[in-house]
Amino acid sequence: MNDTHKLVSDLSEQVSRLVKDELRLARMELTEKGKRAGFGASLFGAAGFAAFFGGAALVAAVVMLLALVMPGWAAAAIVAGALFVAAALLGLIGKNQVQRATPPVPEETIASVKADIDMVKERARR
């Protein structure tokens, strides 16, 4: 009986140690993945920053191209106007998408579940 008690005690201790080791390993793995995700996100930010400046240079090139056929101020005003129109359209589309996403309740799924419950209740009555 004493041997059984010792085996159960040893098993319990080993399972406890195994769980602690697995949790420590999981924590280390998540820390490493978090560091990589943070680094990746910063690289995405740097890419966005570089793309912004590339877009700005492209806008400047369009202004300079238009300045060959009209005064520079007019070329800059036309490009700015086009950018403002694009910003307004993108803003309206974004606003529409946000409104469609709120409230963040799965309305279609809730309606489907209610329909399923009603069907089950109706079949149960028969």
Image: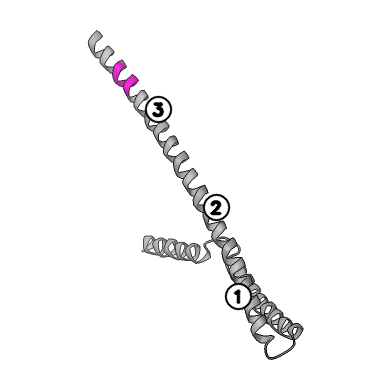
Where is mark 2, residue-wise?
42
Find residue 66 and report its horizontal and vertical position in percent: 66, 86
SS for callout 1: helix
Residue shown at the point (49%, 52%) measured from the top left: 40
Looking at the image, residue 60 lies above or below residue 44? below
Q: Amino acid at mark 1?
A: Leu
* Closer-to-camera residue (20/4): 20
Where is mark 1, residue-wise? 58
Q: Say whether marks 3 and 2 touch (CB < 8 Å).
A: no
Q: Where is residue 104 drawn, in percent x and y?
A: 57, 60
Measured in 3D between alpha carbons, the distance from the residue under mark 3 to the one under mark 2, in whole angstroms, is 33 Å
Alpha carbon separation for disc pair 1 and 2: 24 Å
Quadrant of the rendering where the C terminus is positioned: bottom left
Rendered image quadrant of residue 5: top left
Residue that numbered label 3 is attached to = 20
Name the residue nearer the viewer: 92 or 60.
Answer: 60
From the top left corner, tell me how far across and down residue 8 is, in percent: 28, 18
> Could you tell me what secondary structure mostly forms the magenta stretch?
helix
Residue 4 in sight from this viewpoint: yes
Q: Position of residue 121 (x, y in %)?
A: 42, 61
Residue 90: quarter of image: bottom right
